[in-house]
Amino acid sequence: AAGVIQSPRHLIKEKRETATLKCYPIPRHDTVYWYQQGPGQDPQFLISFYEKMQSDKGSIPDRFSAQQFSDYHSELNMSSLELGDSALYFCASSAQIAGYNNEQYFGPGTRLTVT
Amino acid sequence: QKEVEQNSGPLSVPEGAIASLNCTYSDRVSQSFFWYRQYSGKSPELIMSIYSNGDKEDGRFTAQLNKASQYVSLLIRDSQPSDSATYLCAVKGSGGGADGLTFGKGTHLIIQP
């Protein structure tokens, strides 16, 4: 079965640079979530989108922004990168439509290293 | 502030035995509960979801929910070495369907051959 696709899988940036992470949800899923997982930490929810509108907001820094496009893919834009932004970034998707149960399925993640 | 608590372990269980993982949550209005398995450096993989009090079984896995005690558990029967991983308990509130999950810090499970 098709899964969540994330690109790139690995990204190395320097401090103060910008980065863009992409997420393509499972087909027919309309909701996308972004999570950040630091080394040895649990995933922390950043932000979610349903039908291209921001739905819920977690601990997303002001330097980060995200959006969902008409084809339901999402992009997480990260500016003024800091060393502490080095982490695994996961995208998850779910379906809100009737008959689905809103279970979130995670993509393989993007490993961001800031030097 | 929603909190999800898990014993970090490691929890060591002999192969073929039952592994029991526990989780408590602070937000009484939470409605949806999930168990994810995560191997080192990999993404969380959904194992079980449970929404109502009682037990839910799927193959070797059984999830148990007690909303009055704010307690969720996962039982793994006939444990296999491939079950060795970190198990994350996740909770979703009573808000909209697109709400983010709050995770516990995970229990590191080791299945001894």
Image (tube, coloured by chain):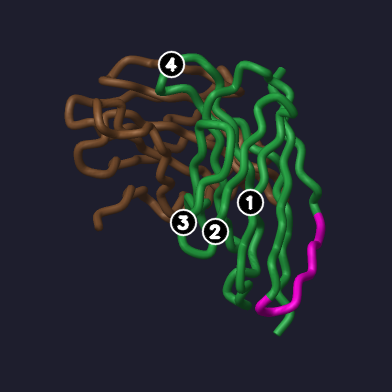
The residue positioned 58% from the left and 63% from the top of the image is: B39
In the picture of the structure, the residue carrying the numbered disc 2 is B61
Contact between marks 3 and 2 (CB within 8 A): the answer is yes
Q: Vertically, is A54 above or below B5? A: above
Horizontal and vertical percent position of residue A21 = 40, 40
Q: Residue furthest front?
A: B54
In the image, the segment drawn in magenta is: B9-16
Q: Residues within 10 Å of mark 4 (few under 14, many from 20)?
A: few
Q: Residues within 10 Å of mark 1 (few under 14, many from 20)?
A: many
Can the viewer see residue A15 in this picture?
no
Res B74 label: 1
Q: Chain of mark 4?
A: B
Q: Chain of mark 3?
A: B
Question: Callout 1: helix, strand or loop?
Answer: strand
Identified by mark 3, the residue type is Asp
For the N terminus of chain A, the image quarter is bottom left
Circles 1 and 3 on the same chain:
yes
Separation of residues labelled 1 and 3 (CA atoms)? 11 Å
Identified by mark 2, the residue type is Phe
The residue positioned 61% from the left and 73% from the top of the image is: B78
Circles 4 and 2 on the same chain:
yes
Chain A drawn in what color? brown
Separation of residues labelled 1 and 2 (CA atoms)? 7 Å
Contact between marks 1 and 3 (CB within 8 A): the answer is no
Chain B drawn in what color? green
Horizontal and vertical percent position of residue B108 = 73, 59
Can the viewer see residue B8 in this picture?
yes
In the picture of the structure, the residue carrying the numbered disc 3 is B58
Res B96 label: 4
Name the one closer to the observer, A89 or B67: B67
Q: Chain of mark 1?
A: B
